[in-house]
């Protein structure tokens, strides 16, 4: 599920800001997710899952941190998110998208500390949301 003790791996020094191509990929994935709006149909859930994975993998590539991929895997299971994205409330999807914008803004502004904080907030929130939607209903 989540290991909150690993937050220190989002160190500002681990971000390489000279990656215009990566930023373009990140912004494309974000725009695609924005274009889905509040759609909740099966196709939208599938597309949102695909674009979310692209967004996160592009952020990892831009960070060029050898530890970040492992940390993300430890914090939040991408497979669990994919299985449960359709169960996220509209508020949870909207909050996640706002957090994505915060992360991208920080990258665009080349503010490593803000990027670290925004990504940490996003991952911890996603883990909590995932725990809520994964709990069996009695």
Image (spheres, helix red, strand yellow):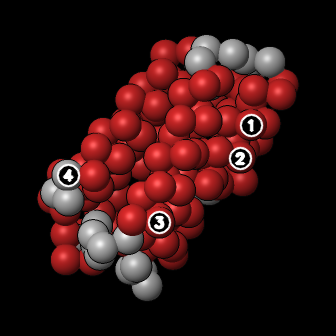
Q: Which mark is residue 29?
A: none
Q: Earlier in the sequence, mark 1 or mark 4?
A: 1
Residue at label 3?
A: 21
Q: Are marks 4 and 2 in contact (CB under 8 Å)?
A: no
Mark closer to the observer (1, 4): 4
Quadrant where the C terminus is found in the figure:
top right
- Residue 115: give x, y in percent of width and height: 25, 54
Residue at label 4?
A: 109
Residue at label 1?
A: 47
Give me the residue at 55% from left, 46% from top: 28
Q: How far apart are the two marked residues, 4 and 3, measured between alpha carbons?
A: 15 Å
- Residue 62: give x, y in percent of width and height: 41, 69
Q: How far apart are the two marked residues, 1 and 2, measured between alpha carbons?
A: 5 Å
- Residue 5: give x, y in percent of width and height: 31, 65
Give me the residue at 53% from left, 35% from top: 31
Q: How far apart are the two marked residues, 2 and 3, measured between alpha carbons?
A: 19 Å
Q: How far apart are the two marked residues, 4 and 2, measured between alpha carbons?
A: 26 Å
Q: Are marks 2 and 3 in contact (CB under 8 Å)?
A: no
Q: Which mark is residue 50?
A: 2
Is residue 22 at least partly visible in the picture?
yes
Q: Is residue 63 left or right of residue 109?
A: right
Q: How far apart are the two marked residues, 1 and 3, measured between alpha carbons?
A: 22 Å
Helix, strand or loop at label 1? It is: helix
Give me the residue at 60% from left, 25% from top: 35
Mark closer to the observer (4, 3): 3
Mark closer to the observer (4, 2): 4
Q: Is residue 14 above or below residue 107?
A: below
Helix, strand or loop at label 4? It is: loop
């Amino acid at each position: 599920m989540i290991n909150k003790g690993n937050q220190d791996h989002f160190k500002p020094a681990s971000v390489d800001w000279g990656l215009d191509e990566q930023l373009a990929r990140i912004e494309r994935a974000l725009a695609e997710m924005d274009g889905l709006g509040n759609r909740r149909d099966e196709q939208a859930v599938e597309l949102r899952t695909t674009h979310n994975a692209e967004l996160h993998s592009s952020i990892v590539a831009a960070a060029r941190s050898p530890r970040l991929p492992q940390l993300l895997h430890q914090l939040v299971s991408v497979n669990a998110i994919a299985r449960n994205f359709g169960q996220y409330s509209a508020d949870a999807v909207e909050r996640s998208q706002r957090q994505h914008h915060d992360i991208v803004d920080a990258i665009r502004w080349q503010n490593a500390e803000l990027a670290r904080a925004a990504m940490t907030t996003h991952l911890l929130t996603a883990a909590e949301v995932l725990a809520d939607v994964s709990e069996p209903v009695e």
